[in-house]
Image: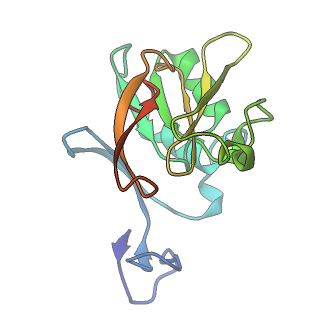
Amino acid sequence: MVPYFGHHGCKQFIPGKLIRFGYKIWCLNTTLGYLIQFQAYQGKGSVTRPELGLGGSVVLDLIKDLSVGPKCRLYFDNFFTSLHLLDNLTARGVGAAGTLRSNRTDRCPLIPPSEMKKKDRGHIDHRYDKRGKVIVIRWHDNSPVTIASNVYGVQPVDKAKRWSNATKKEIQVTQPAAVK
């Protein structure tokens, strides 16, 4: 979000954010933080692929001019991630991973978040799609986290240090490879 307080039709207002008024700009960056590609948000009419929604359209628009190969990996947050987008990227040979909103799992038979909260910290539940290309993982950290990927899976399971309020010390919890 680029702060802007003047009058303009493309200005956005997002309540609860640090920068509430301004221009929303979608960015594609390297892991070192270099900006590769960007696109200004222009309203709901900017959805180029309705079957993928706004987030999926933005991702595909940002990478359309790049020569992405098998070594390329994309990481995005839950606004952009959907199983349809991961299927599309898999068909293009692009690896991707991202957090997934619970309502975008397309009825994947994972343990519901309400039941996952009752499980021990570090509990992992996962399912593959019919072709075995995309995996959806639900992991209980402080709260249930849902991850989707066409590159990473659960194995190798690693250990992560977390603070436990119950024991007042650091504990080791299991962590899937897709989170690491």
Q: Residue at x 51, y 20 (%)?
A: 154
- In the rendered image, the vertical position of residue 145 relative to residue 7, given as above or below: above
- Horizontally, residue 79 falls left or right of residue 52, namely left
**Residue 107 x %, y %:** 80, 35
**Residue 143 x %, y %:** 56, 51
Q: Residue at x 73, y 50 (%)?
A: 114
Q: Residue at x 71, y 37 (%)?
A: 105
- Horizontally, residue 30 falls left or right of residue 163, namely left
**Residue 55 x %, y %:** 57, 47
Q: Quadrant of residue 67?
A: top left
In the rendered image, the quadrant that contains the C terminus is top left
Q: Nearer the viewer, residue 32 or 172?
A: 172
In the rendered image, the quadrant that contains the N terminus is bottom left
Residue that sits furthest to the front in the current view: 167
Q: Quadrant of residue 83?
A: top right
**Residue 15 x %, y %:** 53, 80
- How was the colour assigned to the protein in this rendering? rainbow
Q: Residue at x 60, y 14 (%)?
A: 133
